[in-house]
Amino acid sequence: MNDFDFRRIAPRCGGQREAFEELCCQLAYRTVPQGAYYTRLRGAGGDGGVECFADLPDGNRIGWQAKYVFNIDSLISQAEESLDRALTIHPALTRYIVCFPFDPTGPTGRRGRSDVERLGQWCSKRESNASAEGRRLTIELWPAYRLRSLLLDLDTAGGMREFFFNETILSESWFSAHLDAAKATAGPRYTPDLNVETDLSKWFAAFGFTAAWSQTLEEKVGSCRKAHGRLKSAVCRTGSDSMSPKWPDDLKEAGESVTGKMLQLVEECSSLPATYAPHAEAQLDARFDDVLRGLSFLESRLAEDLKSQHGAGADSAAFRQFMAEYQVSFPAANLDDVRDAKAALRDLQDWLQSPAGSLAFERAFVLTGAAGSGKTHGVCDAARQRLREGLLTCVLFGHSFRGEPDPWTRMLESLGLPITLGRDGLLDGLNSAAEASGFPLIIIIDAINETRPLRYWRDHPPAAFQAVQRRPYYGFA
């Protein structure tokens, strides 16, 4: 596929224009300088003049803009508008790369300026204008020949080219047909009409970094924010009334310290969906323990103060009800605010440590269970649900991996893909499909105990997992 035409790019992500933008972003991602932080922007009209950008260690920003047009007038007109928007929205932008799918014409000796001359003049003018306004800007052009060169250099196995230029494979309909075939292979072990909610669906929701997992995280983080807000208000109270007691002066410093740490921790948890990194949640465990110790200290002291002022039975539901109904007073409000904050934070930590939370930060997991317990039904159902959400899954079966050939040959056979793709072509193609979706692709191998010989999965997994982990958009179950 060395001779490929951008006019015939496969309509991925909604159409040819979107597919071209995605291809340019994937090439940009693979050329980001070491130490830079890459961000892909998604959504129509929400790119702010760039499709993606990379922040460099020195504080400067590189932005990429893709224009799926085939004439110089449209290119310059659209690039002009996008650059104006990019310079406004991205003040750190110093390098602007414009990608387009045709090769500009050079000087011919005829009247009028060539495409190359017009583009050069436009770049010089915009760079000079930026300089006059006190900002540094370099405009770089990636025409068709440059994109082809990058693609050939970066996609040595041909997997990316298969995804972007072979319309017959790795499309949404192809993945749907694959899951239909997996359903047929599963036979009576998968009955879609029979569906019982189990923890397995939550585990795959986490493992695939799905919207359902993010929503659960947002809900638990929201509870922590509300609890923090109430506790912060309590700590800041300098006076008391019948409804709310004053916060003790001797606990003021401790209260301010704990609420500050709690807010920082909650905000870091809120940003976890942007961090698809192994064990990212585990790095917060020590912070959780520190804040929870601080809340426990406040709880202990406030409980002692409450008992010293109102008696041994003050820390009870009966006392709270009596004071609320007959005195319209809430002397335990500070203690209750601390306990609410502690409970909300503990709930968030427990969920992040459970499979339903922590699997979002793993690249592989093994599911075990007795025969007939519903594993095959669960994985097929999870794959179908993922496809409905635009997420990609390959479901394979242990009996397909037989004999001596490596897993990749068997996988290509099971997926109906050309054997000539090889391991790297297969993984690069699937990785591009997953990258275009914005979420990891999960490869599930069900019933590995049915593989013969049994030593197959003892001999092959290390090399297999190493090849998968070199690519960022995979989960292996």
Image (spheres, helix red, strand yellow):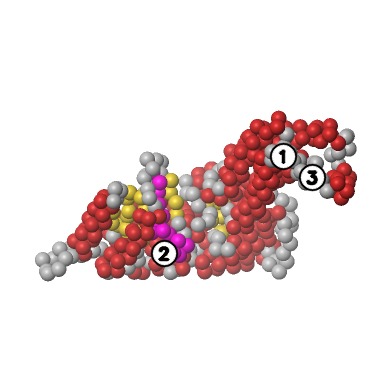
**Can you give x and y, in whole percent of width and height, for residue 307 in the image?**
84, 34
Which span is picked out in magenta? 43-56
Mark 3 and mark 2: Cα distance apart in space: 64 Å
- Residue at point 32%, 53% (across, down): 96
Residue placed under numbered mark 2 in the picture: 19
Mark 3 and mark 1: Cα distance apart in space: 11 Å
- Which of 261/58 is in front? 261
The answer to whether residue 456 is seen in the rendering is: no
Dot 3 or dot 2, earlier in sequence:
2
Q: Residues within 10 Å of mark 2 (few under 14, many from 20)?
A: many
- Which of 108/408 is in front? 108
Q: Is residue 115 magenta?
A: no
Dot 2 or dot 1, earlier in sequence:
2
**Can you give x and y, in whole percent of width and height, for residue 63 in the image?**
37, 53
Disc 3, disc 2: CB below 8 Å?
Answer: no
- Which of 475/415 is in front? 475
Q: Is residue 51 magenta?
A: yes
Residue placed under numbered mark 1 in the picture: 239
Residue placed under numbered mark 3 in the picture: 242
Secondary structure under tag 3 reads loop
Q: Amino acid at mark 1?
A: Gly
Q: Residues within 10 Å of mark 1 (few under 14, many from 20)?
A: few
Q: Amino acid at mark 2?
A: Ala
Disc number lying in front (2 or 1) = 1
- Residue at point 61%, 38% (across, down): 260
The answer to whether residue 318 is seen in the rendering is: yes
Secondary structure under tag 1 reads loop
Disc 3, disc 1: CB below 8 Å?
Answer: no
Q: Is residue 17 above or below residue 452?
A: below
